[in-house]
């Protein structure tokens, strides 16, 4: 999306997605770019002609093939989920979302362009983020009717880290629309699982602006002592064990760091022990040392 397309993005989001975003992102669906609707007093074939043009029909065929493959993937995922549930392990989350600012940066404008838009297209960016917040809130209506083993929605925060924007920009462009979604979920009895990425020391006070006992915050890189002081009575805290340590350290170093984190975070409760990110490159002996330490030392 180019910067001058913000008005269309905001005021005709569905049309923009069908006619511009999808054909640009997925060239095999370029036939959707010509779909439109011409208002007419009499709803005859004329106004609908673009809906069944040769290019549009080809796009529908591809969509049908995508749908069939997606159904296979969903069935496999559900089967695995059922096996895990049968072992007595509940799901960590039953929904996912993104900060509206991240959606624009991840899918529409790119990270750098979105960061620049804070200065060159601030009002349009704020309006777009608010619109995307409302769309996400509407998508969580299933929590009102579907019985679920837990009610948690996972939000990875990609671009809200300390150095990407000032505290005032974070407040009005990033945090405000995200908090709007979080509050709507909390009102439904759903717990937002906020997975911060990158350094987050300058954001801790803003994260505290939520109802007590309703949010889970995961940290990658933050002063955990200060996070405990500011957020300990407000939210559950998770994370911060370095995956670099798990990949390159020794078992003894891992044990000491696990103990340090537990000594700092465990008193008073409200801490879920976790690494600061995915452990793909961790050594087996270090992962085993981590589990052993948490199981034994974490009892006291």
Image (tube, helix red, strand yellow):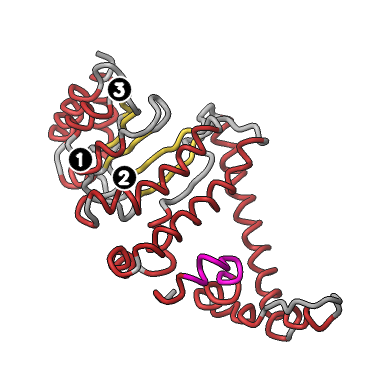
Q: Relative to 192, is 244 above or below?
A: below
User: Which residue is pictured at 16% across the width and 47% down the height?
Assistant: 248
| Residue that mark 3 sits on | 233
**Rendered image: mark on residue 222:** 1
Image depth: mark 3 or mark 2 in front: 3
Sort mark 2 into few (<14), some (14-19) or many (20+) by Cα contacts within 10 Å.
Answer: many
Identified at 50% across, 56% down, the residue is 131
Q: Earlier in the sequence, mark 1 or mark 2?
A: 2
Say which mark, if any, is on residue 283.
none
- Extreme residue in the top direction: 300
In the image, 224: left or right of 148?
left
Q: Is residue 120 left or right of residue 21?
A: left
Q: Residue at x 51, y 68 (%)?
A: 9
Tell me the distance, in whole angstroms, between the alpha carbons under discs 3 and 2. Answer: 19 Å
Q: In which quadrant is the N terminus drawn?
A: bottom left
Q: CA distance from mark 1 to mark 2?
A: 10 Å
Residue annotated with mark 2: 196
Vertical position of residue 206 compared to residue 162: above or below: above
- Magenta stretch encompasses residue 9: yes
Please provide percent x and percent y for residue 71: 66, 56
User: Closer to the N terminus: mark 3 or mark 2?
Assistant: 2
Q: Quadrant of residue 22?
A: bottom right
Of 131 and 65, the residue lying toward us: 131
């Amino acid at each position: 999306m180019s910067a001058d397309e913000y008005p269309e993005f905001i005021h005709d989001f569905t049309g923009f997605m069908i006619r511009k975003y999808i054909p640009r992102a997925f060239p095999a669906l370029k036939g959707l770019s010509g779909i439109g609707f011409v208002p007419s007093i009499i709803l005859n074939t004329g106004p609908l002609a673009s809906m069944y043009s040769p290019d549009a029909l080809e796009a529908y065929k591809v969509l049908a093939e995508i749908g069939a493959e997606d159904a296979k993937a969903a069935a496999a995922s559900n089967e695995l989920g059922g096996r895990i549930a049968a072992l007595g392990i509940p799901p960590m989350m039953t929904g996912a979302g993104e900060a509206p600012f991240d959606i624009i940066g991840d899918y529409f404008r790119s990270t750098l362009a979105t960061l620049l838009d804070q200065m060159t297209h601030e009002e349009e960016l704020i309006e777009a983020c608010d619109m995307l917040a409302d769309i996400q809130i509407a998508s969580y209506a299933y929590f009102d009717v579907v019985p679920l083993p837990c009610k948690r929605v996972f939000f990875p925060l990609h671009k809200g880290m300390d150095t990407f924007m000032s505290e005032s920009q974070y407040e009005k462009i990033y945090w405000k629309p995200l908090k709007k979604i979080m509050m709507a979920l909390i009102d439904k009895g759903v717990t937002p699982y906020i997975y911060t990425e990158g350094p987050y020391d300058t954001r801790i006070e803003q994260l505290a602006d939520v109802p007590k006992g309703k949010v889970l915050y995961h940290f990658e890189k933050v002063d955990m002592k200060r996070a405990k002081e500011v957020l300990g009575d407000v939210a559950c805290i998770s994370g911060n064990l370095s995956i670099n340590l798990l990949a390159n350290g020794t078992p003894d170093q891992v044990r000491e760091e696990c103990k340090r984190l537990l000594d700092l975070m465990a008193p008073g409760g409200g801490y879920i022990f976790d690494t600061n990110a995915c452990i793909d490159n961790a050594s087996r002996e270090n992962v085993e040392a981590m589990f052993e330490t948490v199981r034994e030392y974490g009892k006291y």
